Amino acid sequence: MFTGIIEEVGKIRSVTPTGSGSRLTFFARAVLSDITLGASIAVNGCCLTAVNFGDDWWAADAVPETMNRTGLGQLIEGDPVNLERPLQSSGRFGGHIVQGHIDGTTIIEQIEIQDDDSYRFSFALESEWEQYVCHKGSVAIDGISLTVASVSEDTFEIAVIPHTWSSTNLSNLTKGNLVNVEVDILAKYVERQLTMNKAINLEVE
């Protein structure tokens, strides 16, 4: 489990096709301090497994479905990526529950700088997960735990403080870029429970 608090911004070292998908290699520092083979690391919010590593790099394999259904398939050498290790039992829970299971992708529709040097991002609201996005709710964008500032019929907005802007890949993104989205798992649990309760009530009636 992750929390959406990015530890460092790494870079794509290489993307190499394999017989069963792709091998992605990343330059990194902080997440390598205790890395082991089989360790989980979130890359732009997508949980990957370390299959090899060196002094300043690590590698993971991704199947075609992962490459096609997330933004990982569009990454090229030199691209910045958000990296986070799983939460330790003794760690602080600074963001929200992030599983590393991407629900889909969306497009950045607008980036506006505000008077207080913060930024406001507008994203397309996709029908497959729009019911889980609500005002003041949590959402992970490229693995970053963020709060929804507003929701309209076909878009949602988030406000980004200067620290988050400078310590994640957000400062490298532009209008039209594709980002990974993971909605709040708690919203899914609530929906599931309500659906089950409704079914039980119908049976009773």
Image: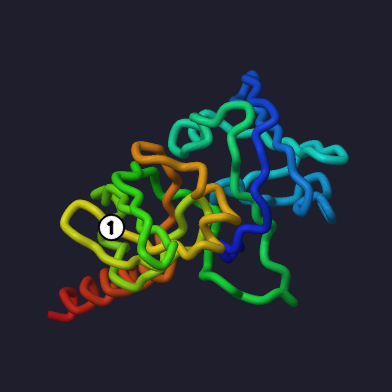
For residue 126, side relative to residue 62 (left or right): left
65 to 193, vertically: above or below: above
121 to 193, vertically: above or below: above
Q: Nearer the viewer, residue 173 or 188?
A: 173
Residue 79 place in picture, x, y as percent: 59, 34
- Residue 130, picture quadrant: bottom left
Q: Residue at x 67, y 43 (%)?
A: 10
Q: Residue at x 57, y 27 (%)?
A: 76
Is residue 72 among what the camera can see? yes
SS type, badge 1: strand
For residue 25, side relative to residue 123 (left or right): right
Residue 183 place in picture, x, y as percent: 40, 59
Q: Residue at x 42, y 70 (%)?
A: 186
Q: Residue at x 26, y 69 (%)?
A: 195
User: For the image shown, how many numbered marks are present on the structure?
Assistant: 1
For residue 41, side relative to residue 153 (left or right): right
Residue 82 place in picture, x, y as percent: 60, 49
Look at label 1 and name its amino acid: Phe
Instruction: Pick the quarter of the image with the C terminus.
Output: bottom left
Residue position for label 1? 156
Residue most toward the front?
115
**Badge 1, how many Cα within 10 Å: few under 14, some, many 20+?**
many
113 to 124, vertically: above or below: below
